[in-house]
Image: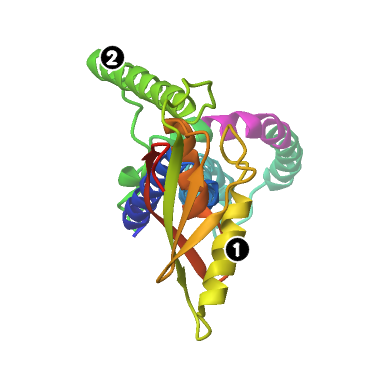
Amino acid sequence: MRRIAYLFGGLAAAGAGTYLVVYLYRWQWQRAMLCGVLLLVVEVLLLGIVMLGRLTRIEERISASDRRQRELAARQEDALARLRQPALEREETQFRWLADPADKAYVFVPVLMVTGVVLSGLAWVVQRIAAATGRPAERRLAGRLAVLTAPDPASPDDLEDLPAPAAVPPRGRTVRMAAVGVVGVALLGGLVVGLADLTQTREEHANDSAATSVVVKVDMRGPDTTHQRRSLAAEQIWERCRDSTSVPLRHETLGDLGDGLFAGVVRPALTDHDRLRLRGCLEDATLERAHLTVVGIGDADTDDD
């Protein structure tokens, strides 16, 4: 599922980036801004998917690490119990003569009992001292032996959950990745430089023609698409694009040709770059329920009407 999201997100980002470059080249700023916003949204979405995947893997690793820590602690306690088992068995061993029948009496029993009490007290003191000083050593020994204990039979997949050792990438792969990075940076730099060159406003040679004629068509949406509304929409868009060229269109007006077609004559004649900017401004203008299309644009001689 995540791969499908990556695929569609990558395709959407590639399409938005492509049309962003195209609209910037055509000087259609409204459409370029929309494509730029869409590109940012797709990039944020892809970034969120990547971060969600990373967080999920981190949570899984933390859970696996906690489980292994609990299992290691259990093994350590098991090893510690096994180390302490012989000492407990020795403590539970009784004197043999106490198991004899009670009807038998010995002369040395009182002396032996007193001596046994004294020796038992000394032994108890020595045992307590040894236990107090030997527990840290036993726990350290149990911790060292825990790695040698057998895994829990209820979880035979522990070895599969352990992280694999980091593999050292081969030299050829590193060289290829470096080459791909260099080529990617070069292509990105060429794209930025080329786009800056295409959208740069520079001084051009004057056009030798007398004027430039522009023919546009206005399409209206809605029930009230009257001729007056089309003419008003054409005039509004034309007035909005008067300053889109290097030479402001001050006194040029549009003439009505009928059927939604309008024509304008610009003097002096526009250069190729100004024509591109004027076409982009006219076709990119945002007007409610109206869309303007440049049908034709070209140079006109002095005697052309």
* Res 181 → quadrant: top left
Q: Give the overall secondary structure of the magenta segment.
A: helix
Position above or below: 264 against 76: below
Residue 175 image label: 2
Q: Which of marks 2 and 1 precedes in the sequence? A: 1
Task: In the displayed orientation, state which residue is furthest to the bottom.
Answer: 223
Per the rendered image, the range of residues in magenta is: 128-141
Q: Residue 59: give x, y in percent of width and height.
A: 52, 50
The residue at the point 69 percent across, 29 percent down is 133
Give whichever of 115, 296 is nearer the camera.
296
Q: In this rendering, would 182 be left or right of 171? A: right
Residue denoted by label 1? 103
Work out how far the residue at label 1 is from the one at label 2, CA to CA, in angstroms: 95 Å
Tell me if residue 72 can be seen: no
Give whichever of 20, 136 is nearer the camera.
20
Q: Residue 67: give x, y in percent of width and height.
A: 49, 51
* Res 124 → quadrant: top right
- The reply to whether the magenta stretch includes residue 61 is no
Element under label 2?
helix
User: Please, what is the three-letter code of the amino acid marked with disc 2?
Assistant: Val
Tell me if residue 108 can be seen: yes
Q: Residue 144: give x, y in percent of width and height.
A: 48, 30
User: Please, what is the three-letter code of the amino acid marked with disc 1?
Assistant: Asp
* Res 246 → quadrant: top right
The N terminus - image quarter: bottom left
